[in-house]
Amino acid sequence: MIRPSVLLFALLISAPALYRYVLDQLDISAVLIRFLIAVPVAAILLAALRFVTAGYGKTEEVPAATVLTPSPMDATPEAGPGLPS
């Protein structure tokens, strides 16, 4: 499905040809061909714009600060029997 923004942008791109048709300087088939060529061009340009601007506006959630408390397992072992001191 083609997005409405693509069709509007394609119409904007082919507007000079449409204007020349209104002034009887161009045939309707030439205007339609130019519009049909403008549709994939507009789709590619708007897709590139969407790709570039996709990351803007997204905020990354910062994880809450974690407080590290020492556990008894983290304590350094004392020198016991069989261990060098």
Image: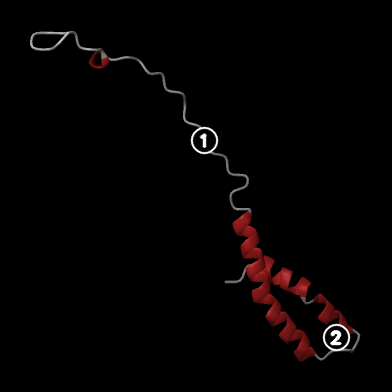
Going by the numbered disc 2, the residue's amino acid type is: Tyr
Looking at the picture, how far across and down is residue 67, in whole percent?
A: 41, 18
Q: Quadrant of residue 77?
A: top left
Q: Quadrant of the C terminus?
A: top left
Q: Could you classify mark 2 by the number of other residues whose Cα lies within 10 Å: few (under 14), some (14-19), or many (20 or more)?
A: some
Which one is in front, 78 or 54? 78
Q: Which mark is residue 51?
A: none
Which one is in front, 81 or 43? 81
15 is higher (above) or lower (below) than 72: below
Looking at the picture, how far across and down is residue 51, in whole percent?
A: 59, 58
Which residue is rendered at x = 38% and y = 18% of the image?
A: 68
Q: Quadrant of the N terminus?
A: bottom right
Which circle's residue, 2 or 1, is located before the other in the chain? 2
Looking at the picture, how far across and down is residue 36, in whole percent?
A: 68, 81
- For label 1, the residue is 61
Which one is in front, 52 or 23? 52
Q: Is residue 42 visible in this depiction of the protein?
A: yes
Q: Looking at the image, how many numbered discs can be counted on the residues?
A: 2
Q: Could you classify mark 1 by the number of other residues whose Cα lies within 10 Å: few (under 14), some (14-19), or many (20 or more)?
A: few
Left or right: 47 with respect to 29?
Answer: left
Q: Quadrant of residue 19?
A: bottom right
Q: Is residue 4 visible in this depiction of the protein?
A: no
Going by the numbered disc 1, the residue's amino acid type is: Glu
Looking at the picture, how far across and down is residue 2, in whole percent?
A: 61, 71
Which residue is rendered at x = 68% and y = 71% of the image?
A: 42
Q: Which mark is residue 21?
A: 2
Callout 2: helix, strand or loop? helix
Disc 2 vs disc 1: which is toward the camera?
1
